Image (spheres, rainbow, N blue to C red):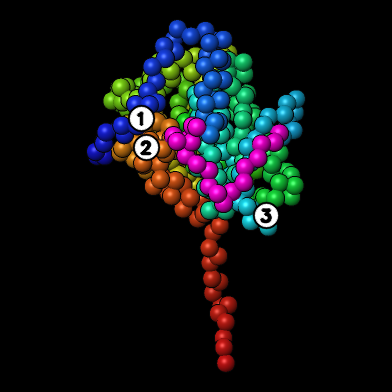
Amino acid sequence: MLTKGKAPLGTRLLKDTRDWEACTDDELIAARDKANRMASSRAARIITGRPDRGARIENTTIDLPGRRPMVRVHRPKDANRPLPLIVSFHGGGFVAGTAAQNDWLNSHLAARCPAVVVAVEYRLAPEHPLPQPIEDGYDTLVRLVDDAVGWGIDPAAVAVMGESAGGMIAALLALRARTDGPALHAQVLNYPSTDWTDTLTDYPSMTENADNPTLSLSRLQVSRRVSLPPDLDSRTVSPVKFDDLSDLPPALVITAALDPLADHGRRYAERLRQDGTEAHLTCYPNATHTFLSTPGVVPAARPARREVLTFLRGHLHPVPRKQPGHARHHG
């Protein structure tokens, strides 16, 4: 059994004190816009981490049917050949968050994997409830792969990655791509939410970590209420509720022991393994929710980032196996 540590002192700066249940939709939108401006600022890098100097970052738009979402593209500065593609999704409960909050991780993966990392600014509730964020993710993935030459990517080396709600999007994309394509070679799910049904909070980690500083249960419940339309079957956006989790790309599931969502990730990894999908699960004992986007206050972010890099390198840059009977002879 994993022994939990204590939340790092710096996480008190991130303590979630807002009364989310009392917020109107307009107040949620205003709070989101303010938080996203802050997360995108240079001052926030004390908490969110400095981008890797070996990567360049640019914002652009991508043409999708009826919309042009922004994407934040991370590339190694010395790229001169097609590179693997990692499509990344930020967290925020489908009502908040921005691609810039993941610059520390995404730029590092771009420079060190190396890869082209495309972080998607998917549409958010309450204006754009589910499944619209998921449709943005899938349509972006397809468009990128279809125009692999234009984006400088290798369509035979593609992965999806996300944190929290973004982890749910990444998992759902892997499930859809299993039948509809494109082929994926890896999925990285960082403290994902995997159950958006009525059983969202019916996990031991929810009560064990109810007093955590970075994710309140009320925020989770409000996020679900605001993002889930009454006519949408919540099981269709809850990966852990899918009947068949076989034939999916290898998964790395990272959880935080002090996170209410820890058991969402743990249970999903167990289900993947039960259905024959390769799944690696790591739980960091001194970590809270959002820790990979708050490396300035949670030291566990660094070993977790190394693990993500090693996993993606292994699946996107596999070492060629020596073929028998092809040994080189000298003489």
**Residue at screen point 64% across, 29% down:** 136
> Where's residue 45, x and y in %?
48, 36
Q: Secondary structure at mark 3?
A: loop
The residue where tag 1 is placed is 11
Q: Is residue 239 visible?
A: no
Q: Is residue 146 visible?
A: yes
Choose the circle earlier in sequence order: 1 or 2: 1
Q: Secondary structure at mark 1?
A: helix
Residue lying furthest bottom: 331
> The disc labelled 3 sits on which kind of residue?
Pro
**Residue at screen point 56% across, 25% down:** 37
**Residue at screen point 49% across, 18% down:** 223
Asked if the residues shown at circle 1 and circle 2 are in contact, with their CB atoms under 8 angstroms apart, the answer is yes
> Where's residue 271, x and y in %?
42, 37
> Where's residue 81, x and y in %?
68, 57
Question: Is residue 76 magenta-colored?
Answer: no
The residue where tag 2 is placed is 298
Cα gap from disc 3 to disc 1, whole angstroms: 39 Å
Question: Is residue 54 magenta-colored?
Answer: yes
29 displayed left or right of 79:
left
Mark whose residue sits in front, 3 or 2 = 2
Choose the circle earlier in sequence order: 3 or 1: 1
Cα gap from disc 1 to disc 2, whole angstroms: 7 Å
Residue 289 found in image quarter:
top left
51 displayed left or right of 132:
left
